[in-house]
Image (tube, rainbow, N blue to C red):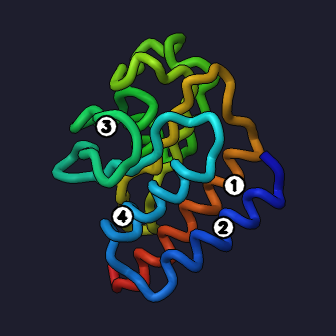
């Protein structure tokens, strides 16, 4: 992917979320946008922090794991550390949670404000080593657009 691709995607995301502050509606539309626009992925969606664990939110792709313990798997590690996790081959991760055996690589961006952990944006690919630093930067920009809309709701 290129900077131009992610600039365009960020513009689409901002337009899609403009004027809307509902977290679920925005997650649904963003997951659909990402699933349609990102090549070579097989899952795009959100998990939200509820009562100390991640619970699946809006997504596109095959059915997903419903709940993930904090610190477990790529998603649980991302929110526990508040750091993006970019994994070249999920089958080489000891605590990987297999929701879709076809997924090979994954990138997970944590969603948080200064005072609150919200959840994660999760993207899977059937290809090994699908995500690079440019993808990480671009998807972190998309996550920031989501968080900007979220904070407009007064949370």
Q: Specify whether 42 is left or right of 140.
A: left
63 w.r.t. 32: above or below: above
Dots 2, 1 in contact, CB < 8 A: yes
Q: How far apart are the two marked residues, 2 and 3, measured between alpha carbons?
A: 29 Å
Q: How far apart are the two marked residues, 4 and 1, measured between alpha carbons?
A: 23 Å
- Mark 1 and mark 3 lie on one chain; the one further toward the N terminus is 3
Taking the view exactly as shown, the residue that stands out farthest to the left is 51
- Which residue is labeled 3 in the image? 70
Mark 3 crowdedness (10 Å alpha carbons): few <14, some 14-19, many ≥20: some
Dots 4, 3 in contact, CB < 8 A: no
- Which quadrant: the N terminus? top right
The foreground one among 104 and 133 is: 104
- Mark 2 and mark 1 lie on one chain; the one further toward the N terminus is 2
Q: How far apart are the two marked residues, 4 and 2, measured between alpha carbons?
A: 24 Å
- Which residue is labeled 1 in the image? 138
Dots 4, 1 in contact, CB < 8 A: no
- Which residue is labeled 4 in the image? 116
- Which residue is labeled 2 in the image? 10
Residue 75 percent coordinates (x, y): 41, 37
Q: How far apart are the two marked residues, 2 and 1, measured between alpha carbons?
A: 8 Å
Q: Specify whether 55 is left or right of 18.
A: left
Residue at x 40% of width, y 46% of height: 60
Residue at x 55% of width, y 51% of height: 36
Report the mark closest to the observer, 1 or 3: 1
- Mark 4 and mark 3 lie on one chain; the one further toward the N terminus is 3
């Amino acid at each position: 992917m290129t900077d131009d691709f992610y600039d365009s995607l960020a513009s689409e995301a901002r337009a899609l979320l403009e004027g809307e502050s509902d977290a679920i509606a925005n997650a649904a539309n963003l997951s659909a946008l990402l699933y349609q626009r990102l090549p070579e992925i097989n899952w795009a969606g959100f998990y939200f922090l509820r009562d100390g664990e991640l619970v699946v939110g809006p997504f596109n792709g095959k059915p997903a794991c419903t709940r993930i313990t904090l610190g477990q798997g790529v998603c649980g590690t991302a929110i526990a550390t508040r750091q993006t996790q970019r994994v070249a081959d999920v089958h080489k991760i000891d605590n990987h949670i297999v929701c879709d055996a076809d997924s090979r690589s994954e990138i997970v961006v944590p969603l948080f404000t200064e005072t609150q952990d919200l959840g994660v944006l999760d993207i899977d690919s059937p290809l090994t080593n699908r995500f690079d630093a440019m993808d990480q930067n671009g998807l972190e920009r998309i996550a920031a657009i989501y968080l900007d809309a979220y904070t407009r709701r007064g949370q």
